[in-house]
Amino acid sequence: MKLSPVIACLAAGLLTGGRAASQPASLPTLKSAFRHAFRVGAALNAPQFAEQNTQALNLITNQFNTISPENVLKWEPIHPAPDRFNFDEADQYVEFGRKYGMFIVGHNLIWQYQTPAWVFQDAKGGVITRDALLQRMHDHILAVVGRYKGRIGGWDVVNEALNDDGSLRQSHWMQIIGPDYLVKAYQWAHEADPTVELYYNDYSMENPEKRAGAVALIKTLQSNGVNLAAVGLQGHYKMDWPTPGQIDDTIDTFAALGVKVMITELDLDLLRPSNRTADLSQMDADAQNANDPYANGLPDSVQQELASRYAELFKVFLRHKGTITRVTFWGVGDGDSWLNRGRHNYPLLFDRHYQPKPAFDTVIALAH
Ligand code: G3I
């Protein structure tokens, strides 16, 4: 049979830069390689869970058994005005997870970012009272957690409540309500869905000062009767931070409090110096001041270093498989990552064409 030129080109991979758009059936999968250790997941954006990004679809459904929403469950998109909820994309996200039998994560209920200004204002544009803000928080949590009751398996209830020195961040939540906003948020999430898992999620807890703050926070929750299922280490890591020892210590510390540990937003930043945290204002300043050294691709030597670093991290995770319940990447392919921010970063296991990188092979090899 004679193939048309287009079909023939596709068959030869010529129209996809020599790469086939879908994965070979023989590609090993992260979810089955690590099935005896922990779930493996990815944060999805709207084109991915709406199944519009067909290139990513096979990869997502084959590789992962848990998903997180990169943005659509945050307050700003889901509750843009006092009397208006917009559940369309969040519903699609949850339906995607159900269709493919995945554990569905909720991210997040209370955060200092992506929360509209109106939340903290009264009708005249002044600062809202403590009681009124508590009422708003209550209503939001009941509405959102309640809607997905029995479908979302676990919620990041409060996200990033701590400063790097371990003190409580002076967010609007903290300034207007005071520190008890934390306990209330968890109590209301539990009220909305008594069986859903409740998580505390933050970055840089591998550093001892911030970790001490997290320990105090978790003990406060527990002493107020909150059944915290797990703490999420976001895992926005660098090539030289944190060390395996720091991660070991962090996981052991939280396990001793009787909670599980999840790696919730894993990626490896090749562009930012190690003294920078994952704070967004710092990231934007960095992006403006720095150049784009890998605009034309990643040198092979750096690709190999990335693979070794990923192997180092997964060795740590496997050592703690009794405590770690989930490892979730913050994005599917390198092109999706928040770490690009106008530059070319290479933080994940799959490249911009959703093809496995050498880091994928080293990680898979550890499981066997
Ligand atoms: O919502 C607007 C949309 O209306 C507009 O059309 C679009 C145009 O640029 O911007 C949209 O907002 C962007 C939003 O992502 C949704 O795409 C924001 O500008 C952008 O800053 C925002 O970035 C997100 C970031 O959180 C900030 O909240 C990233 O995608 C997301 O990956 C990142 O995720 C966080 C976790 O939730 C918590 N831990 C840190 C992690 C990385 O910062």
Image: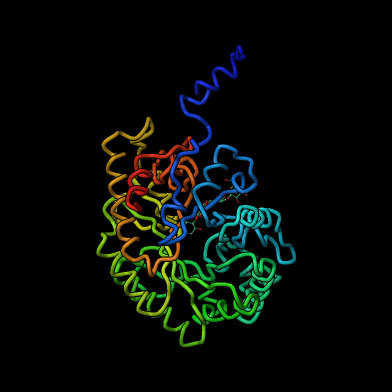
Image position, residue 92 (x, y; %): 67, 53
Query: To which quarter of the image does residue 346 belong?
Result: top left
Q: Residue at x 68, y 57 (%)?
A: 91
Q: Residue at x 61, y 48 (%)?
A: 49
Above or below: residue 257 compared with residue 311? below
Image position, residue 44 (x, y; %): 55, 50
Q: Residue at x 49, y 46 (%)?
A: 332
Above or below: residue 246 compared with residue 215? above
Residue 254 or residue 168, whichever sits in front: 254
Tell me how the rendering is colored: rainbow
Q: Is residue 58 left or right of residue 169?
A: right
Above or below: residue 168 compared with residue 268? below
Q: How many marks?
A: 0
List the single residue furthest toward the front: 1
Residue 48 or residue 150, whichever sits in front: 150
List the single residue furthest toward the right: 83
Above or below: residue 88 compared with residue 6? below
Quadrant housing the N terminus: top right
Query: To which quarter of the image does residue 210 belong?
Result: bottom left
List the single residue furthest toward the top: 2
Q: Is residue 284 left or right of residue 10?
A: left
Query: To which quarter of the image does residue 344 belong?
Result: top left
Q: Is residue 31 left or right of residue 293?
A: right
